Image (cartoon, rainbow, N blue to C red):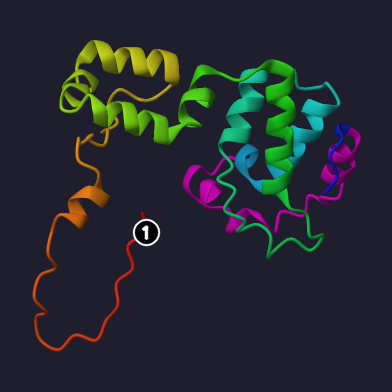
Amino acid sequence: GHESIDDLEVDTEHCIRCGLCLTACPVFSELEWESVTPRGHANVIKAYLDGTLEDHDLVKENFDHCLKCKQCLDPCPAGVEIPNLVLRAQEHHHQEQGQTLADIVFAKPRLINTVGSLAAPLSNIVAETTPARAIMEELLGMDARRPLPEFNRESFKKWFDSHEPEPAVGDLDRDVAIYI
């Protein structure tokens, strides 16, 4: 792990821009935009770091399109870890430009879930109103048409603990794992 901006720039230069990563990138297969490929991310990071790309909204949007799924690692002949570079560049961008409200809110899903659950079912009713959806779209960039999960006062763990398991049906020899 290199940590300085100079190291990030050097690490980005290791990408030879061959394009073998394009078909591995699920975002590219959906959008077909060169800028959201791993190669595109390397180009945007380089342009951002050397000052030739100063449109911070475009930089942020580019970084946000990387899912960090690491599908690009196998086809890369140079062994460049683009998801890691994007994370490091995002961190630098946040230090330089500050975080957006959406960055801050979505980084705290447990807090959102706790508050939403405490106020359920009122929080569900409010979240579905047109004004609330418009505010979420304006402030957080969340499309107002996007369905939202419902909050429930009772947690899954409490619900599960209060229920007896159903009697076995047939002779099943399967295990089920529930992650909480």
Can the viewer see residue 41? no
Can the viewer see residue 126? yes
Quarter where residue 142 is shown: top left
| Residue span colored magenta | 6-33
Work out whether residue 110 or residue 18 is closer to the camera in this orientation and state it: 110
Residue at horizontal 28%, vertical 18%?
A: 133
Work out whether residue 119 or residue 101 is closer to the camera in this orientation and state it: 119
Name, please, the residue furthest toward the bottom.
171
Residue 56 pos. (x, y %): 67, 19
Query: From the viewer's perspective, is residue 68 above or below residue 147?
Result: below
**Mark 1 — residue?**
179
Residue 128 pos. (x, y %): 20, 22
Residue at horizontal 59%, vertical 42%?
A: 66
Q: Using a 10 Å C-alpha cutoff, classify the residue at mark 1 as few (fewer than 14 neighbours), some (14 to 19) or many (20 or more).
A: few
- Point out the image quarter for the C terminus: bottom left
Query: From the viewer's perspective, is residue 38 above or below residue 153?
Result: below
Residue 178 pos. (x, y %): 32, 62
Describe residue 58's horizontal placement relative to residue 46 as left or right.
left
Residue 162 pos. (x, y %): 15, 54
Work out whether residue 131 or residue 110 is closer to the camera in this orientation and state it: 110
Residue 14 colored in magenta in the image:
yes
Query: From the viewer's perspective, is residue 166 above or below residue 88?
Result: below
The amino acid beneath tag 1 is: Tyr
Q: Main secondary structure of the magenta part?
A: helix
Describe residue 143's horizontal placement relative to residue 39 as left or right.
left
Describe residue 172's horizontal placement relative to residue 13 as left or right.
left
Quarter where residue 138 is shown: top left
Residue at horizontal 74%, vertical 19%?
A: 96
Considering the numbered disc 1 on the image, is that residue within a helix, a strand or a loop?
A: loop
